[in-house]
Amino acid sequence: MTKNKDKVAIVSTSLGSGGAERFAALLSFMLEKLDFEVHNIIINDAVDYEYSGKLLNLGQQGKNYSFLFRKITKGVLLHRYLNENEITNIIDNRPRNHLIREIITKWIYGKRKKQYVVHSYKLDNYFPKSVFWARILYQNTDKIICVSYSIEEKIRQDFGLKNTITIHNPHSFPKKIEFKNQDLNSDKYIMFLGRFDEKVKNFSLMLEAFSISKIYHKGYHLLLMGNGPDLGFIQEKIKMLQIEPFVKILPFKSNPFEQVQHAKFTVLTSHYEGFPLSIVESLALGTPVIAVDCNSGPREIINHEQNGLLVENENPEAFAKAMNRLIDDSVLYDFCKKNASKSVEHLSLSTISKQWESVLS
């Protein structure tokens, strides 16, 4: 790396499983291609995705310390690292829901250029409830990067902040995946991939809709791939609905593209989202999507009956009907599949990179 490169730190909770974490990994590659010197700084010790640039893993520091002293140690190390590496620009990719911590973090960041990314429509994860304190923390930030237009509109409406911009999450992988798992070729399934978190992803709706649809009588399984705190809840719900023979649960995989491309379609039933990469990547691989019309993201990605189906939220009967429709109506399905990859061409890594370059220049 040459000394004259602009130095950017991407600060994230981790590089472990999750949409925001995958985004951080993709962003590191985008910025390196734009000739920035990239520093990945993670708070917790979890690295599942490949990344580009240097890594400071604060999660490995002070493991034997008390909770408070460990937090202080991470703050001191972060402050020192930013100074010693002469970081000029910070992209904060974390949830920011603790006021005192964020006041301290703002002091640590100092006068460097700052971009704060907001990944969820649930703004409580990123802003204090007080409009006064939200403005104190964010009004002088260089940019608040929103991953959907709906999020940007809500921030402007709720907090009166004007320094916002929408940059969608990108996708990046080969358009055609070579199948290595021969079992997939004989298996018919629909698929969810993401974090096993009931409060966000609403597996109750997903599993109830699958049960109501009875598409398992047509030979289709539901494949759930991911990890998270509510695996036990999901397993109990599957038992309660008596659909155990028809639901398969697989662990998180950083590159699930082979499974996604072979799926009939993928599903999303979240209470709320940001700009779900699982939908974008499914479409990019030519696999249609059925998603609820939650805030936010799906309606900015899915064109109803063009690349998938957008369904009223909190309505398992409507979602079950959509499942059967996409299986039974071959004309509709083929049309959605044909349009899928083209519908997200504007979200390619190269296109989104240009938007980030404009913000950081």
Image (cartoon, helix red, strand yellow):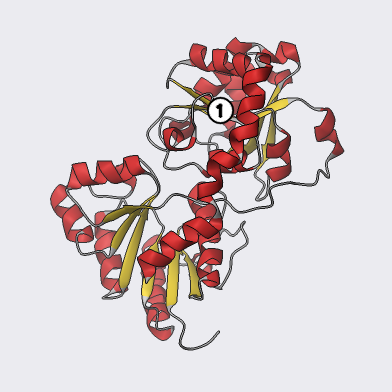
Specify the quadrant of the image occupied by residue 192: top right
The answer to whether residue 252 shows anywhere in this view is: yes
Question: Could you tell me which residue is drawn at 58 percent across and 41 percent down?
Answer: 342
- Outermost residue, left direction? 132
Which residue in the structure is indicated by mark 1? 308
Q: Could you say which is closer to the camera, residue 26 or residue 99?
A: 26
Question: Could you tell me which residue is drawn at 27 percent across and 65 percent down?
Answer: 142
Percent coordinates x, y for residue 165 in the rendering: 32, 54
Percent coordinates x, y for residue 225 in the rendering: 65, 37
Q: For label 1, count other residues whose C-alpha is less than 10 Å away and answer few (under 14), some (14-19) or many (20+).
A: many
Looking at the rendered image, the quarter that the C terminus falls into is bottom left
Q: Could you say which is closer to the camera, residue 297 or residue 124?
A: 297
Specify the quadrant of the image occupied by residue 356: bottom left
Looking at the rendered image, the quarter that the N terminus falls into is bottom right
Q: In this view, does 52 lie to the left or right of 248?
A: left
Question: Could you tell me which residue is drawn at 52 percent across and 17 percent down?
Answer: 319
